[in-house]
Amino acid sequence: MTAILVADDDMDIRDLVAFKLEQAGYDVMAVDNGLAALTAATENPPDLVVLDVMMPGMSGIDVCRQLRLDRETKALPIILLTARAQEGDVEVGFGAGADDYIVKPFSPRELVSRVEAVLARMRT
């Protein structure tokens, strides 16, 4: 089963994302902060990571950058999920190494579709 790591400090969003991905057939591990995401991703790399950008302590951008620096996780697909929709924010996200960038509020169906699209691109 495809494993997805979800990191979001907002419990409602984290639970919604995890629920929708589990409904779509994915094995989901959910954490509530960036440091926990970095630890989980490096100790047992999932097939894909969904990161909230604005988390206390270590942001999703920082986690993304750290994962790209590590030999074991540098090719790990990463989707950033954020309320930050300005053009500059999107540029920073992709510049940090994100494979996709989804702006909140989002459609849960669109999130699942984007996860599937990123995973499909990684398989080819």
Image (spheres, helix red, strand yellow):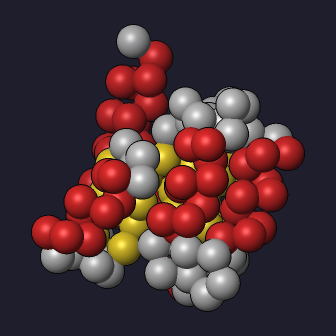
Q: Which residue is located at x 72 percent, y 58 percent? A: 38
x and y, in percent, of residue 62 in the image: 56, 65
* 7 left or right, relative to 87: right
* 83 left or right, relative to 55: left
* 86 left or right, relative to 39: left
Q: Which residue is located at x 42 percent, y 46 percent? A: 97
Q: Nearer the viewer, residue 98 or 9?
A: 98
Point out the residue furthest to the right here. 43
Is there any visible trace of residue 88 in the rendered image?
Answer: yes
* 3 left or right, relative to 61: right
Is there any visible trace of residue 17 in the rendered image?
Answer: no
x and y, in percent, of residue 51 in the image: 52, 63
Q: Nearer the viewer, residue 110 or 38?
A: 38
Point out the residue furthest to the front here. 69
On-image quarter of the N terminus: top right
Q: Which residue is located at x 74 percent, y 70 percent? A: 35
